[in-house]
Image (tube, helix red, strand yellow):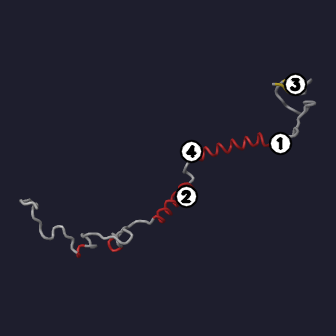
Amino acid sequence: MAYGSFNAGPGKAPDEDVVRTNQIGVPGGVATLDADGKLSESQRPAVDAYTKAETDQRISAAMDAHNGAENAHSDIRASVAAMNASIKAIELKFGTNVTKNPFSATFGSLDGLAVAGVWNAEQARVEF
């Protein structure tokens, strides 16, 4: 057994490190948690906010309104219009099945026709 003096530190008031029952779960006191580890309903502050579902719905509606506006995404709309015109030209060029000349024009004579140029009678054409 040891003998001697020791310093136990400064003295404390009797209730300095004690939480009293009337301080638990009240404003300004010590919060308590429910079985799920969350604040109990009575200890939660009132919050003026949207739920996640309400927020998602509002964002979706705002995006739909923006995307549907005529002045939205003008650069993308112009690019799409130019691309559609190019596609239509390609389809017209390569997608049209021409099996014979759909029209013909011949000049056997120039009677009743006013033209400017030189008449090539041998080849029956006007040359410019």
Q: Secondary structure at mark 4?
A: helix
What residue sits right under mark 1 in the picture?
97
- State if disc 4 and disc 1 touch (CB < 8 Å): no
Residue 102 seen in the figure: no
Q: Which badge, 3 or 1, is on the more N-terminal residue?
A: 1
Mark 2–mark 4 Cα distance, whole angstroms, equals 18 Å
Q: Is residue 73 above or below residue 39?
A: above
Left or right relative to 42: residue 121: right
What residue sits right under mark 2 in the picture?
64
- Indicate the quadrant where residue 28 lies: bottom left
Seen at 54% across and 51% down, the residue is: 72
Left or right relative to 19: residue 73: right
| Mark 2: amino acid | Asp
Furthest-bottom residue in this view: 22
Q: Secondary structure at mark 2?
A: helix
Name the mark nearer the viewer: 2 or 3: 2
Furthest-front residue in this view: 1
- State if disc 1 and disc 2 touch (CB < 8 Å): no
Mark 3–mark 1 Cα distance, whole angstroms, equals 34 Å
| Mark 1: amino acid | Asn
Seen at 80% across and 42% down, the residue is: 96
Mark 2–mark 3 Cα distance, whole angstroms, equals 65 Å
What residue sits right under mark 3 in the picture?
119
Q: Which badge, 2 or 3, is on the more N-terminal residue?
A: 2
Q: Secondary structure at mark 1?
A: loop
